[in-house]
Amino acid sequence: MTTVGTEVLDNPAWVALHGPHARFARTYGLAARYDPDVAPFHALADVADPQAWADLARLVGPGGSADVAGGPLVAFPGWTVVSTGTGVQLVGLTSRGAADPSLLRLGPADVPDMLDLIALTRPGPFRRRTVELGRYLGIRSQGTLIALAGERLHPAGWTEISAVCTHPAWRGRGLATRLVRAVAHGIRARDETPFLHAAATNTNAIRLYEHLGFSLRREVTFGHYRADQSSSSDRVAS
């Protein structure tokens, strides 16, 4: 299902890297990626274009790897498909969010604790500079970070809610709900619309997001690819 007016979400990483997140971009021709310290994502102008894949090979270098969303999951010349997955994309067209002043604004000083919680709960990729992509909020108990959520991909007019996670000992207390609502509220305050991704098998998270006013837009395929060692050794990043 595709919602009218959301076409930029067909390729959100590409749009973000050529828009609000251009400062984090490394590009070559029809391929782009985030700075590896910021996020592991790669994007192509057109995932069905062999030239875009050739440009991506130049960008990552021989033997380099790339995580691409929305791909056809086939091995283009010079590439091997290492692993694949299926997720869903949801849009918060009716989600208004709610302010929550009791939540903590997280920043660079909180990154070690954020990385520990991410490693424990595994909500998705998070790097030491991911916190620079947007506004991250958290909850601490006696100094320990027990829940967080924040902003990741940022195509113009939209912001992705990501890294939603709660320490296992604190689940079932509505912490994720508070965080998602607060992050969504901040996005709405900028006259933008929230969206998010979840693994297709994570039915509990999908159910929560739907309860908060998000609706399914489409399924998304994710692929992890590796460039052949024989790929061009020229690596160009702008």
Image (tube, rainbow, N blue to C red):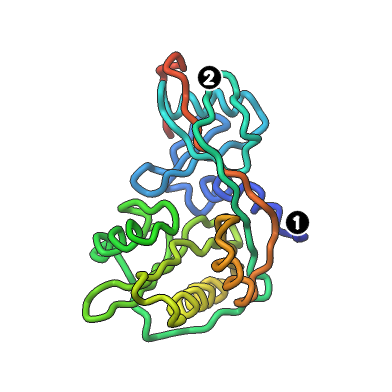
Q: Quadrant of residue 91?
A: bottom right
Mark 2: secondary structure: loop
Q: Residue at x 55, y 47 (%)?
A: 13
Task: Answer whether residue 132 is visible to the viewer in this image.
Answer: yes
Q: Is residue 226 above or below residue 224?
A: above
Residue at the spot x=76%, y=56% of the render? 1
- Residue at point 46%, 17% (across, down): 231
- Image coordinates for residue 15, horizontal then vertical, percent: 58, 48
Residue drawn at x 53%, y 19% is 78
Where's residue 49, x and y in %?
66, 28
Q: Which residue is mark 2?
A: 78
At label 1, which amino acid type do we have? Thr
Direction from residue 97 to residue 114 in the image, left or right: left
**In this figure, which residue is indicated by the disc labeled 1?**
2
Cα distance between the residues tagged 1 and 2: 32 Å
Q: Examine the rendering and report whether any part of residue 235 can be seen.
A: no
Q: Tell me: 78 left or right of 47.
A: left
- SS of the residue under disc 1: loop
Q: Where's residue 161, x and y in %?
A: 51, 64
Badge 2 amino acid: Gly
